[in-house]
Image (spheres, rainbow, N blue to C red):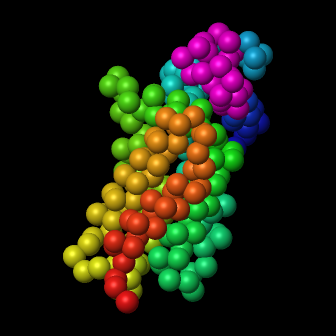
Amino acid sequence: MNVRQKQGQKTKQKIIEAAIALFHERGFNNVTVDEIVAVTNTSKGAFYNHFTSKHEVFAEQFKQIDQFYVEHLVPQLDADQPVMERLTLFLELQMTYLQNKIGWDVTRTIYEQELSTERSSYFLDPDRPLYDILFSLCQEGIEKSEFKEGYRAHNIVTVLIHGMRGVLYNWSLNRGRTSLVDEQRMVFRALLDGLKTGD
């Protein structure tokens, strides 16, 4: 990467961080591109060189969250532990991170924007790293007979993703007044108990 490319990446990250801070402070719909440009002391040309819209800036939040899972959560999983224990730990770490670092308001805004019919949703992107993490764990669990017979990895991942969305949506509706970590623990215990092989 040459000097110009490095500077471009630096400017892009600066825009992302400032925009996310503004979205968190004032709400996505109340922030304009002009304000993002002003706060970052850049130009509209620089903004549109990296992003087609402020929604695309917001979408970067997804990518950064997923990258955090890959770089910081997955390494905490002990490969010698049963898959069910690793899944439980991953979900606990995930929801702790979302509760403490992302917050209910940004989560709510994510859901608002992903419900738009004007664009495809990152939630449905099959190439999300989150889906790869879950699929890999579920496939291993099937191979080790930790799940009931008849389930495919794709089906289990779908159930887990639906559980995640439900817990996060409910937490957002309650404006963060409930414990996301406690609620996910209750929901995923029930889901995983229903999926695992009986003793």
185 left or right of 33?
A: left
> Which picture quadrant has residue 196?
bottom left
Where residue 148 appears, as percent x and y from the top left, is 29, 79
> Measuring 38% from the left and 45% from the top, which residue is drawn there?
125
- Residue at horizontal 45 percent and vertical 52 percent from the top: 164
In-front residue for pair 5/117: 117
- In front here: 118 or 162? 162
| Residue at image point 57% right, 29% down | 57
Position of the C terminus by quadrant? bottom left
| Residue 116 location (% of width, % of height) | 37, 26
- Residue 131 on the magenta span: no
Q: Which residue reaches farthest bottom? A: 199
Query: Quick check: can you spot residue 19?
Result: no
Residue furthest top in the image: 34
The residue stretch that appears in magenta: 15-37
Q: Position of residue 132 (x, y in %)?
A: 44, 61
